[in-house]
Amino acid sequence: MAVSVSAYGTGAGGLINGNNRNLQLQQQQQQQGLIILKTRTLQFKRVAVAGKGVVVVRSQKGGVFENVAVINGKSTGALKSESVEDELARVMRDRAGKDRGAVRVAYQGCPGAYSEAAAIMAHPGCQGVPCKSYEDAIWAVEFRRADRAILPVESTLEGSVVRNYDLLVHGSLHIVQEIQLFVHYCLLVAPGVRREDVRRVISHPMALAHCGHTLARLGLDSAPVHDTAGAAELLLNDKLTDTAAIASCRAAEIYGLRVVARGVQDESWNTTRFLVLARGSDLPPPPQEEEHRPLKTSIVVAHGGGLDALFKVLSAFSKRKINLTKFEVKPRAAALLRVLDVNGGGTVREFEHVFYIDFEASVADLNAQSALEELREAMTFVRVLGCYTADSKIYSLD
Ligand SMILES: O=C(O)C(=O)C[C@]1(C(=O)O)C=C[C@@H](O)C=C1
């Protein structure tokens, strides 16, 4: 099995060689590496960081070298093997065994990102597939490197991420689930850095927006990076001593960072809604009487413009007493929307005027089907993006 490896530490041993034939280590897969340096008190001699949160370090304790494995932030204590490489191979074999058969969920960011947390809420025990961008996460599913993709699409503080809805309709994936997550941010610094040394904060642009008032109050500059956990990782990698990262407490644990402030988002109830995407589109089972979890259907509608279109869409749903939970008008200033027409032989079509709509009914419901029929007759284009069970709870990382 190929694993990614990178190295950190103070000792002369440095990197476990990426070309080690026995382990088929492949540095180009570095993206999958997860750094967990919880053992601040140890002098690192050799440190290997492998995929899925496994770290094997050769440490110096009281002048004696020993091998220590740190898995997901928890030290397993001294290991039997004298050889770090053997230990790494063993841990990776175990890990591969555990991962076999697990649902592979692609998300944007590094381990410790909120999207990864949403992936775990959606599929406990899943195998996370970290990706550089949202597009990559979608492609990972389209090209079968993953079974599901996670896409953040709206937050209570900033509203809809229309760009991510647009990405969704460029491809052929279906929405199969939604996850709502309380997003509470922490301010993290590298070990040894003091709060008063911090001049600048780095994080995902959405996280910086969610904490805009706090940052202004503290008089801190900010700079965007790919994701919140990526910001945490950067603090360690680049040994930043004047910079803090906005990320989760979970990211602090994973990367061995210090939490200097909690709950730094501008509102305590800040929640992000994620969509889970898959290649297939099995209809969810109808809800049980006692469940109070209605089914939801998401659609994209393109039209010729004007108020008339808005009226026709609203009337198709209101006269059938179908509740709308989302009605998003794509801003006209935005680029034309390119949609994959899955019913039209997979052709790509471009539209200027677009609505994104969620309604409370199954797409199989006769009432909903007649509303969709009416829309298809009156609008330029209608595509069902998915039908899934509404998420009645809001998950929390705390
Ligand atoms: O950077 C992360 O941790 C992400 O998972 C991305 C993301 C987003 O794109 O909105 C997800 C949730 C939070 O709202 C902040 C950032």
Image (cartoon, rainbow, N blue to C red):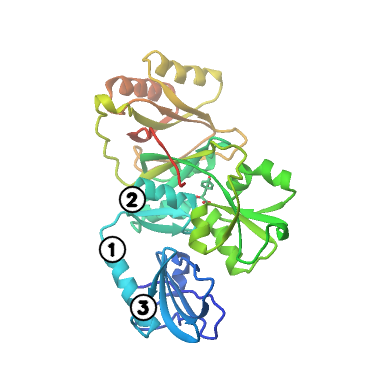
Q: Position of residue 115 (x, y in %)?
A: 46, 49
Q: Which residue in the protein does label 2 denote?
A: 124
Residue 199's tag is none
- Judging depth in this view, the residue of 343 and 61 nearest the camera is 61
Give the quadrant of the N terminus: bottom left
Q: Tag 2: residue type?
A: Pro
Residue at point 44%, 64% (across, down): 73
Q: Residues within 10 Å of mark 2 (few under 14, many from 20)?
A: few
Outermost residue on the top side: it is: 319
Q: Give the residue drawn at x 70%, y 56%.
A: 200
Amino acid type assigned to the residue bearing label 1 in the image: Lys
Q: Amino acid at mark 3?
A: Leu
Please say if 74 is above or below 305.
Answer: below
Whether residues under marks 1 and 2 lie with C-beta atoms below 8 angstroms apart, the answer is no
- Reading the chain from its start, which is encountered first: label 1 or label 3? 3
Expressed as whole percent of the image width and height from the top left, the position of residue 364 reads 27, 28
- At horizontal 62% and vertical 35% (from top left) the residue drawn is 333
**Mark closer to the observer (3, 2):** 3
**Earlier sequence position, callout 3 versus callout 2:** 3
**Rendering coords of residue 224 (x, y %):** 63, 53
Q: Is mark 3 within 8 Å of ligand 1?
A: no
Where residue 293 appears, as percent x and y from the top left, is 33, 29
Element under disc 3: loop
Q: Which mark is residue 98?
A: 1
Badge number at residue 79:
3
Depicted 174 relative to depicted 86: above or below: above
Q: Quick one: label 1, few (<14), some, or many (20+) residues within 10 Å? A: few
Question: In this rendering, would 129 be left or right of 328?
Answer: left
